Amino acid sequence: MTGYENCHLCPRNCGIDRTRNPGPCGGGSLPRLARAALHFWEEPCISGEGKDVPGSGTVFFSGCTLRCCFCQNFEISEENRGREVSEERLCEIFLQLQQQGAANLNLVTGTHYLPSILRALDIAGDRLQIPVAWNCGGYETIESVEALAGRVQIFMPDLKYYDSALSGRLSRAPDYFDRASRAIYRMIELAGPPVFDARGLLTSGVILRHLVLPGHRDDSLRLLDWIASNLPRDEFLLSLMSQYTPYRPLPYRELNRKLSSFEYNAVIDRALTLGLTHTYTQQRTAAKEEYTPPFDLTGI
Ligand code: SF4
């Protein structure tokens, strides 16, 4: 795995020296964070809804290797809002979340800070007892995924697009599916099948997430066909999300509205038809802005 001086941490493969200038992901040479707090808006086996735990210990990293044009967290992914911290402070933040009773440590969009995260986890050592979840956009190199082996027990990758023209248009990543599908396959190999504790909280495994986009139902259906044909059944959980919310006007007309029930139900029906029964779905009321927490440096 490379470091920040010659950065190849994600498939963009910039090769730039981030100790001099930030990369196109916004990442410099110290981790930048926007929020570290208990968070409830994940799947119930992660946030502990109804399981007598106060939430998932969620660390939101600023910047992003993908920067999808419709990102609900654009204040941090694109505008890079946040504060830099040392690796020692990052470790303290992890331990403070554990002390608050977090069900797990949920690292959101940390790919571009992978070396610092690994060092912070090393500093924490055995003091960190809760499962660590890698919550990412799926756009990962195999090397980065393998660097997480033994440090992370849960992978929560998105699988956003099947079509390369679509991923090129919305995330400037025409190689998205090729990269993400290979990374996800490796995550499943590393994490193994889902394991839950007595409370029903996930302690290891993969939750593969897909946000259904308005106007792009067909791409979701093609993704499900690929998932059913290519990934080992029963060795991952699937989460089909309907929470898409237009946050700002976009040049793509279909993305300036919420998802319709017809579109979402068509995707759920296809998953069931394909036998993808280990699937989380969302209520249609999920498309609310409250899914986006305030990026106000809480806990940093
Ligand atoms: S992590 Fe950032 S700087 Fe490094 S390769 Fe990816 S986009 Fe480029």
Image (tube, rainbow, N blue to C red):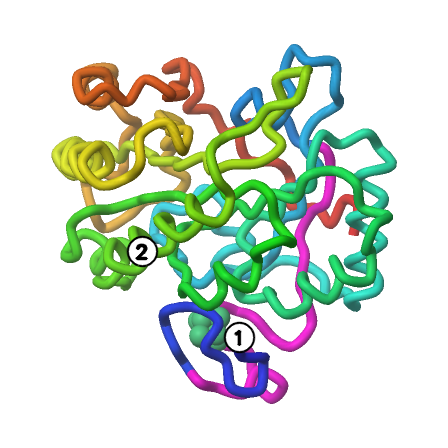
Q: Position of residue 211 (x, y in %)?
A: 34, 35
| Residue named by callout 2 | 182
x and y, in percent, of residue 215 in the image: 17, 34
Q: Amino acid at mark 2?
A: Arg
Q: Is residue 73 above or below residue 90?
A: above
Q: Is residue 182 at least partly visible in the picture? A: yes
- Residue range highlighted in magenta: 15-38
Residue 24 seen by the camera: no
Determine the residue positioned at 16% across, 31% down. 221
Q: Badge 1: few (under 14), some or many (20 or more) residues near its Cα, within 10 Å?
A: some
Q: Residues within 10 Å of mark 2 (few under 14, many from 20)?
A: some
Which residue is the site of mark 1? 1
Disc on the earlier residue, 1 or 2? 1
- Element on which disc 1 rests: loop
Left or right: 84 as drawn, with respect to 112: right
Three-letter code, disc 1: Met
